[in-house]
Image (cartoon, helix red, strand yellow):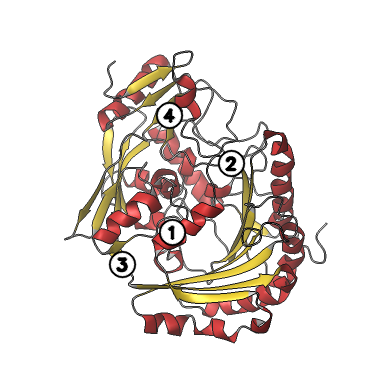
Amino acid sequence: MSFTGDIVWRGEPGYEEARVGRVFNARRPERYPAAVLLAASEDDVVAGVRLARDRGLKVTVRAGGHSWAAWSVRDDALLIDIGGMSETTYDPESGIATASPAVKGGAELVPFLTSHGRAFPGGHCPSVGIGGFLLQGGQGWNGRKYGWACENVAAIDVVTADGELLRADEEQNSDLLWAARGAGPGFFGVVTRFHLRTYPLPRAMTHDTWMFELSELELLLRWIDELLPSFDRVVEPVIAATRLPRPEGPPVLLLHTTAMCDTTEEADRVLAPLRACPIADRAVAHETGLTTVEQENEAQAAQNPENHRYAVDCTWTDARANELVPHLRALWSELPTEHSFSIWYGWAPSRPLPDMAFSVEGRAYIATYAIWTDPADDERHRSWVVDHTARLAALGKGVYLGDTDFTRRADRFLAPENFRRLEEIRARRDPEGRFCSYLIADGAELNAEPDRRRRTGSAP
């Protein structure tokens, strides 16, 4: 079987680079695919799936390589790497853009759409490929207004388990589109192209950023938590604990709020509640003004450096400030390295989700990122992230697939009825189990609801 791209079998020259060279997390897994297909076209993807079928191999897919757990690197599978397929188009009549899964949301899709005066709720880190981002749901810019990025996927082109290239939209193969909106690395096909609904580019994106000492956590979180449901949908408030502003000192709190507005007058109106900050006189710093997604992405890139090792975990929660503060204080005071950080992302008020696989969210999203360089610190930092998150998850509702590693801690990521429907579609579309499903620790139960205990008082 011939390919336009290259296929590298285990033991051949170039295998190790093909296996993990595009994995963003420098903590590379000890898992070894049978081969890596460096696909250059949709025909290569079709041929790759058929080759796997003929040889009895499982299939995995890598788009951007930004998965923290390296979902795509699986023992004895055929890894189809579509990083060489990079295409973007825009139709001004329909407002639909198309993009290959390996297109980087911030670094490539954003400037492309900006040149057409359009926007899409893409991811916050510029080097993330849109493939995994969209399949997992896609928590992106202006998400409180336009919803999850996957809600704005109008169609996909997908190679199925039997090696057919299909279009899936609301009218044809709609079960595949339903699954692609939230199945994440458990999706049973290779998406080769996304068709995206775009929106007019906001011309006055504005930020309002405060810095406080960690000792102000309780007052700060109580205030924002109360304000959250009343914020205009274009307002996105995040409280981040980080050491970056002063690496040698203790962690600080950044209240970073953005509003993707069309005029400065609109931005001034929707951000006005922040001017009533009850602890404004205790702020270490305060800045506000116009910004762009490109500028915001630069800051995200600085916080998420390349060639570093990562451990990440998260939880959705409806818990209010008084329950969260003891746990967050314990977690945020212990940030172990200069780049490690943790966020509380305000998401309320809730709204009905469209009919799609993605189905778990909450009032707020809490995610923690340990970032380091020495392999000798792997176990210590991974345990730190997972142990703290497990305590927070006792107040939680489930996880977002984009910030999880089920090899250490499993949790619910889909509503039970959505998970059952996903597995029913999988049984029809991939009856032989050609595509690898979720990477999970031995003995762990997939999409299980762990023991949720309502806790108050100090974190253990």
Q: Which residue is mark 1?
A: 148
Mark 1–mark 2 Cα distance, whole angstroms, equals: 28 Å
**Callout in the foreground (3, 4):** 3
The amino acid type, in three-letter code, at marker 4 is Pro
Q: Which residue is mark 2?
A: 308
Judged from the image, the secondary structure of the residue bearing numbered disc 2 is loop
**Callout in the foreground (1, 4):** 1
**Callout in the foreground (3, 2):** 2
Quadrant location of the C terminus in the rendered image: bottom right
For marks 1 and 4 on the same chain, the one whose residue lies earlier in the sequence: 1
- Left or right: where 173 falls relative to 93: right
Circle number at residue 201: 3
The amino acid type, in three-letter code, at marker 2 is His
Quadrant location of the N terminus in the rendered image: top left
For marks 1 and 2 on the same chain, the one whose residue lies earlier in the sequence: 1
Q: Position of residue 286 (x, y in %)?
A: 57, 76
Mark 3–mark 2 Cα distance, whole angstroms, equals: 33 Å
Q: Which residue is mark 4?
A: 431
Dots 1, 2 in contact, CB < 8 A: no
Dots 1, 4 in contact, CB < 8 A: no
Viewer-closest of 449 and 298: 298
The amino acid type, in three-letter code, at marker 3 is Leu
Judged from the image, the secondary structure of the residue bearing numbered disc 4 is loop
Residue under the image location 30 percent in, 65 percent down? 199
